[in-house]
Amino acid sequence: SIVLLLKGSKSWERKCYGIYRKEKAKILEKEKMYPMALLLWNRAAIQGNAFARVKIGDYHYYGYGTKRDYQTAATHYSIAADKYHSAQAMFNLGYMYEHGLGITKDIHLARRLYDMAAQTSPDAHIPVFLALMKLETVHLLQDILFFNDLVTL
């Protein structure tokens, strides 16, 4: 069938058009699309899909199909990191610890999670390197500003 479509078969085009007319393809509006996707990601996560667990965290983090909830996002990222060893979940959780989003700010735990993400997946090396450079730079600047405040007192 795919070969016929690539060759531009008129019979294949008629079949597709007939299916379209018969089924009257329904496309969800944007405000219904994200809640439906979240429901389906939840079903996949319950069945043990690690990628789905990270996606649920993303939906809660960004507020797609639900209200923005950093604590719930962190919970799903933690499950994906602990149970499935997901480098993406470790990285996202590290970012949340670095910035104190929905959880207590903890720079040391953020570093550890970034390092674990890099150890888990070679694809995480560059994002982790950049995240750690930013973290260390911000930390250094805060230390310099704190030291300058102490000197001027």
Image (cartoon, grey):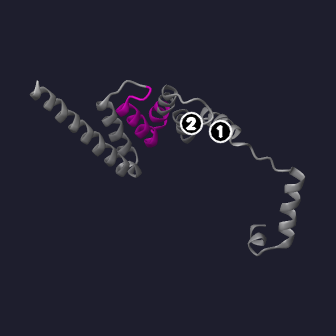
Q: Which residues are magenta?
A: 78-102
Which residue lies at the image location 42% right of the left edge and 38% below the top edge? 90
The 10 Å Cα crowd at callout 1, few under 14, some 14 to 19, many 20 or more, is some
The residue where tag 1 is placed is 34
The 10 Å Cα crowd at callout 2, few under 14, some 14 to 19, many 20 or more, is many
Q: Amino acid at mark 2?
A: Tyr
Q: Amino acid at mark 1?
A: Tyr
Percent position of residue 40, x then y: 67, 37
Which residue lies at the image location 48% right of the left edge and 26% below the top edge? 71
* For residue 102, above or below residue 89: above
**Quadrant in the picture for residue 119:** top left
* For residue 71, above or below residue 113: above
Left or right: 43 in relation to 146: right
Q: Are marks 2 and 1 in contact (CB under 8 Å)?
A: yes
User: Magenta-highlighted stretch: main secondary structure?
Assistant: helix
* For residue 51, above or below residue 25: above
Q: Secondary structure at mark 2?
A: helix
Q: Which residue lies most toward the bottom here?
A: 7
Compare residues 115 and 34 and report the one nearer the observer.
Answer: 34
- Report the quarter where the C terminus lies: top left
The residue where tag 2 is placed is 59
* For residue 106, above or below residue 9: above
- Report the quarter where the N terminus lies: bottom right
Q: Is residue 136 magenta?
A: no
